[in-house]
């Protein structure tokens, strides 16, 4: 049997397996696996009852997440291709160039892998058939049972479709069982893959031809160690830790840059403060000028008050003279009206009339002046309170104002405007304060990131040690069931992994390159199965693109053929 069939026998139940089998393997299908007789398996099948067979069949077929069908249009060598999958084990075989590995690449591409991870192209556009402008991939997943993802939305099937285009952006579509497009967002695809625990970058979920070739070769301890990291998820954890380390480094560089900026802000604040203090006497001059201008306003009020006082005094004098003339006329009339000189009477009457007119005029002027004084006083009071004491003369105030203006202009030309200096100083102080606060927050975040980095690194080391022990244990258990003993030797410092195994009848262990070709292949397969038995992940399907150069040659020569060892 092929190495893939061997894996399926030991794989976890309820997991779908998809594998590509070289065509030459069909010749040796009757050869039993290492350490097992074909008769024992036939006896087990005869002893199983039909009821147990049905129960076992129901228990091992997963109800959600497995691949039901793959459809390809203009993708690599497939112009229009579709294939349905059994819910358990599937073997895909064909001649060279028939597109077996293209199916694996399509599953990877549709499930968000980069083009380089398919080992078929450096960019997604190179996966489109030559001469074509687009390609389409559809992967249909089963979506039933208790672990179904939003069955009320998608139904019993979820179709993941990816359209590739040479001249525009690539597009994802998540389609329901009825053909309705539910979403085009990549985030929703990530949610589906996370829900079903599908991680196609894990070689134990999807083993590409190149990864299989490196494994079957088994002579590069560094590649074996890297496979261990990827298969256990430690590589992904390590990448996350590296991302945190990069973030820490970036934050440290940013803090260094912020320190330089703070020094610049401190220098600017010191210069602004110096300029501000230099311009303080300008503000004093400005205040004196403002006060003088206000005093000028009050001096105007004082002038109005003096004018009003003079008008009131004149009005009082006119009123008294009027009363005197009125009394004189009255007295003369009582003495002798007939003997009174008419001419004198006319004169006194004329003067009295003039005095009455003058009084009325002065009364109007007084009222007008009072109104002007009242409005002016209200206006000036809103500007500044009335100063105590007597106001200086307006002439002195005008001269003082002119002198202050000239002095202020000279100082501003020499040192600049005080207001501008004040604004610049306030801004410099504010910028410095904000920069110090940003630096404080950055340092706090840096300390938190360092703690996260330290904790995750320690957890990663502990996990690596535990997983190495578990993988070693399962590896040896698989070998023991086949009459072998072995161990995995890890060198974490050099990042190397060496496989040692011997048949039960030998005493000394041997590394894989010292084993026979068949033993080496079997040992590598046991190594792969050791990860599957760990239950580190619960992927609904696993795919293997087989390239077993040693077992191909072995079976080919046993069958009496004569082709090259690299035939598929």
Image (cartoon, rainbow, N blue to C red):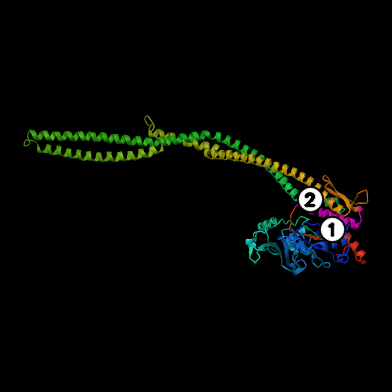
Q: What residue would you read off at disc 1?
A: 213
Q: Is residue 121 above or below residue 467?
A: below
Return the residue at label 2: 229
Question: The C terminus appears in which quarter of the rendering?
Answer: bottom right
At which x and y percent is residue 343? 11, 38
Which numbered disc flags the more N-terminal residue, 2 or 1? Answer: 1
Label 2 sits on a secondary structure element that is helix
- Check disc 1 and report its element: helix, strand or loop: helix
173 magenta-colored = no
- Count how many numbered circles sit on residues in the image: 2
Residue 240 % position (x, y)? 72, 48
Residue in the picture at 45% in, 35% down: 289
Q: Answer above or below: position of 558 versus 478.
A: below
Name the spot of residue 408 as percent of width and height, x first. Answer: 49, 36
Q: Is residue 518 magenta?
A: yes
The residue lying toward the viewer, choosing from 108 and 348, is: 108
Residue located 60% across and 35% down the image: 270
Residue placed farthest to the top in the image? 389
Q: Residues within 10 Å of mark 1 (few under 14, many from 20)?
A: some
Q: CA distance from mark 2 to mark 1?
A: 17 Å
Magenta stretch, residue numbers: 514-536
Residue placed at 70% from the left, 41% from the top?
451
Give the quadrant of the N terminus: bottom right
| Location of residue 168 in the rendering, given as x and y in whole percent from the top left corner | 68, 63
């Amino acid at each position: 049997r092929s190495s893939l069939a061997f894996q399926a026998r030991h794989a976890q139940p309820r997991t779908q397996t998809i594998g590509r089998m070289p065509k030459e393997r069909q010749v040796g299908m009757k050869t039993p696996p290492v350490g097992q007789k074909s008769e024992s398996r036939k006896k087990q099948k005869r002893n199983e009852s039909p009821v147990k067979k049905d129960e076992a069949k129901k228990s091992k077929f997963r109800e959600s997440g497995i691949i039901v069908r793959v459809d390809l249009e203009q993708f690599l060598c497939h112009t229009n291709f579709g294939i349905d999958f059994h819910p358990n084990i599937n073997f895909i075989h064909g001649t060279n160039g028939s597109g077996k590995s293209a199916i694996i690449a399509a599953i990877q591409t549709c499930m968000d892998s980069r083009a380089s991870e398919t080992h078929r192209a450096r960019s997604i556009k190179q996966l489109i058939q030559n001469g074509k402008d687009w390609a389409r991939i559809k992967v249909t997943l089963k979506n039933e049972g208790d672990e179904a993802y939003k069955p009320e939305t998608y139904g019993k099937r979820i179709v993941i479709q990816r359209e590739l285009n040479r001249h525009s952006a690539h597009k994802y579509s998540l389609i329901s069982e009825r053909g309705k497009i539910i979403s085009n967002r990549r985030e929703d695809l990530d949610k589906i893959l996370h829900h079903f625990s599908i991680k196609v970058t894990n070689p134990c979920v999807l083993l590409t031809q190149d990864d299989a070739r490196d494994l079957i070769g088994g002579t590069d301890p560094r590649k074996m160690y890297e496979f261990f990291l990827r298969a256990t998820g430690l590589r992904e954890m390590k990448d996350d830790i590296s991302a945190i380390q990069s973030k820490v480094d970036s934050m440290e560089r940013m803090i260094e840059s912020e320190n330089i900026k703070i020094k610049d802000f401190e220098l600017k604040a010191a210069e602004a403060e110096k300029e501000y203090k230099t311009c303080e006497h300008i503000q004093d001059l400005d205040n004196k000028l403002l006060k003088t201008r206000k005093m000028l306003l009050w001096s105007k009020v004082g002038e109005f008050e003096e004018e009003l006082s003079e008008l009131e005094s004149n009005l009082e004098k006119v009123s008294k003279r009027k009363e005197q003339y009125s009394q004189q006329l009255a007295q003369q009339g009582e003495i002798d009206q007939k003997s009174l000189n008419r001419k004198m009477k006319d004169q006194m009457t004329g003067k009295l009339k003039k005095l009455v007119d003058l009084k009325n005029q002065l009364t109007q002027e007084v009222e007008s002046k009072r109104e002007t004084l009242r409005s002016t006083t209200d206006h000036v009071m809103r500007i500044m309170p009335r100063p105590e004491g007597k106001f200086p003369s307006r002439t002195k105030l005008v001269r003082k104002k002119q002198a202050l203006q000239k002095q202020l202009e000279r100082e501003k030309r020499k040192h600049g405007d005080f207001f501008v200096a004040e604004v610049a100083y306030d801004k410099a102080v504010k910028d410095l304060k904000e920069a110090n606060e940003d630096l404080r927050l950055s340092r706090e975040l840096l300390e938190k990131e360092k703690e996260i980095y330290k904790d995750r690194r320690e957890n990663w080391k502990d996990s690596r040690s535990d997983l190495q022990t578990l993988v070693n244990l399962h590896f040896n258990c698989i070998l023991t069931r086949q009459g072998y003993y072995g161990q995995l030797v890890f060198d974490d410092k050099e990042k190397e992994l060496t496989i040692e195994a011997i048949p039960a009848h030998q005493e000394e262990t041997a590394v894989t390159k010292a084993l026979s070709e068949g033993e080496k292949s079997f040992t590598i397969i046991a190594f792969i199965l050791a990860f599957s038995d760990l239950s580190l992940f619960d992927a609904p399907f696993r795919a293997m693109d087989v390239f077993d150069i040693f077992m191909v040659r072995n079976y080919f020569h046993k069958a009496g053929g004569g082709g090259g060892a690299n035939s598929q």
